[in-house]
Image: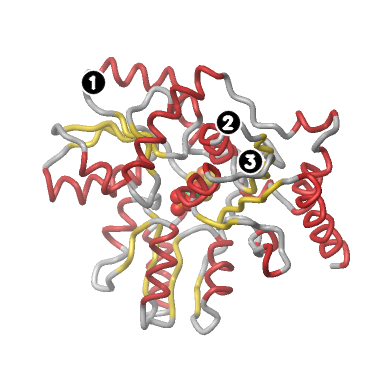
């Protein structure tokens, strides 16, 4: 553990000397989520929407992004004058990788005039072909706000179906979907959640929008359940009198919730996002050490000017909406 503490100390010192801030997602390993003011390294911890807003407002020269590549790209697009460093480019995402800009162009040809809503879990070239972005926090409101009787929602099939169920009932609007899946949340099947409900009948089920639609429909029957974004889940736990929860989301969100609400109990099948887990204290330290050296380019998020400009518009539309 001395190694970890020494690394944390060095990161804190390097942030100060190199004028850098660390932004960290709720799915990061616990040690990357401790706030700077509490002796850790994170200047901001949040969900993908919170991190986008935070990135836009950064004044320091460097953003060290402890999250996955699509999030770091979004930070760069929103604050292009800053250097955004990603500690590992192995930090991908099964959703972002499921679709390309060319796929979106083809979809638009097949469905002319239908608005395209791109989940933030996409790469810049996909966003560049889209009308508006959304995150799990604002997807429902954005989908509701768009005119017409159809919209293209991409790339998460399950989240799309979960949105579709609600929207169709309210507005009759039809969603055209893509076949992307989150490799973490797709594992929260009805069988898995129902097995836990048998063991913990008093527990409240909390699942992310990205879990399969039959989990949302089956697993909740008779028990009630919360389907939402990471922030919705955190908020619900804070406001609820319930003390025991079954979490259908990423393993380290369970650790985050335990830290925030030590008096409550969280039953979490520990499924880790292999992409998020590419980021560590060690490679965060290496990214900071690289600043100002020839190694810096290895960590730098670089995007074509033209793509950045076109991807900015749908992200800005989303932020204006929120
Ligand atoms: P949030 O928008 O809730 O942060 O979700 C990010 C993510 O990767 C979900 O799997
Ligand atoms: Fe992508 Fe799922 Fe990992 Fe989030 S948890 S980064 S959606 S693979």
Dot 3 alpha-carbon crowd within 10 angstroms: few under 14, some 14 to 19, many 20 or more: some
Cα–Cα gap, marks 3 and 2: 21 Å
Q: Residues within 10 Å of mark 1 (few under 14, many from 20)?
A: some
Q: Give the distance between the C-alpha atoms of the residues marked 2 and 1, in whole angstroms.
A: 33 Å
Q: Say if disc 3 is inside 8 Å of ligand 2.
A: yes
In the rendered structure, the answer to whether residue 252 lies left or right of residue 151 reads right
Q: Quadrant of residue 126?
A: top left
The residue labelled by disc 1 is: 111
Residue 135 on image: x %, y %: 40, 45
Choose top left, top right, bottom left or bottom right for residue 244.
Answer: bottom left
Circle 1 SS class:
loop
Mark 2 is surrounded, within 10 Å at the Cα level, by few (under 14), some (14 to 19) or many (20 or more) other residues, namely some
Residues 306 and 3: in front is 306
Comparing 13 with 125, the one in front is 13
Q: Position of residue 293 (x, y in %)?
A: 85, 32
Q: Is residue 21 above or below residue 175?
A: below
Quadrant of the image occupied by residue 202: bottom left
Q: Does 148 sit above or below residue 283?
A: above
Nearer the N terminus, badge 2 or badge 1? 2
| Residue lying at 23% horizontally and 36% vertically, measured from the top left | 175
| Residue appearing at x 50%, y 28% in the figure | 124
Q: Nearer the viewer, mark 2 or mark 1?
A: 2
Residue 71 coordinates in the image, percent (x, y): 54, 41
SS state under label 3: loop
Q: Earlier in the sequence, mark 3 or mark 2?
A: 2
The label on residue 80 is 2
Task: Count up the numbered dots.
Answer: 3
Residue 113: x and y in percent read 21, 21
Figure coloring: secondary structure
For mark 2, give the secondary structure: loop
Location of mark 3 (residue): 91
**Residues at badges 3 and 2 in contact (C-beta under 8 Å)?**
no
């Amino acid at each position: 553990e001395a190694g970890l503490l020494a690394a944390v100390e060095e990161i804190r010192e390097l942030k100060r000397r190199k004028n850098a801030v660390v932004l960290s997602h709720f799915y990061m390993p616990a040690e990357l989520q401790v706030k700077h003011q509490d002796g850790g390294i994170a200047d901001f911890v949040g969900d993908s929407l919170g991190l986008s807003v935070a990135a836009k407002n950064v004044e320091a020269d460097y953003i060290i992004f402890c999250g996955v590549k699509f999030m770091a790209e979004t930070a760069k697009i929103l604050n292009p004058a800053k250097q955004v460093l990603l500690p590992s480019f192995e930090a991908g995402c099964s959703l972002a990788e499921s679709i390309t800009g060319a796929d979106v162009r083809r979809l638009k040809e097949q469905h002319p005039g239908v608005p395209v809503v791109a989940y933030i879990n996409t790469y810049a070239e996909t966003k560049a072909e889209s009308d508006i972005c959304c995150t799990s926090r604002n997807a429902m409101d954005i989908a509701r706000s768009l005119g017409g009787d159809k919209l293209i929602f991409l790339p998460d099939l399950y989240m799309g179906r979960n949105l579709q169920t609600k929207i169709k009932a309210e507005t009759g609007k039809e969603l055209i979907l893509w076949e992307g899946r989150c490799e973490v949340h797709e594992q929260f099947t009805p069988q898995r959640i129902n097995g836990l409900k048998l063991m913990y009948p008093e527990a409240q089920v909390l699942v992310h929008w990205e879990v399969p639609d039959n989990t949302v429909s089956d697993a909740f029957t008779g028990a009630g359940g919360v389907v939402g974004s990471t922030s919705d889940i955190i908020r619900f736990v804070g406001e609820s009198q319930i003390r025991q929860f079954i979490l259908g989301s990423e393993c380290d969100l369970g650790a985050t919730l335990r830290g925030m609400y030590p008096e409550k109990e969280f039953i979490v099948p520990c499924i880790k996002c292999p992409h998020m887990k590419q980021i560590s204290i060690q490679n965060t330290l290496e990214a900071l050490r690289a600043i100002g050296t020839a190694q810096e380019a290895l960590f730098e998020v670089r995007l074509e000017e033209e793509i950045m400009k076109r991807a900015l518009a749908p992200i800005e539309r989303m932020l204006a909406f929120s």
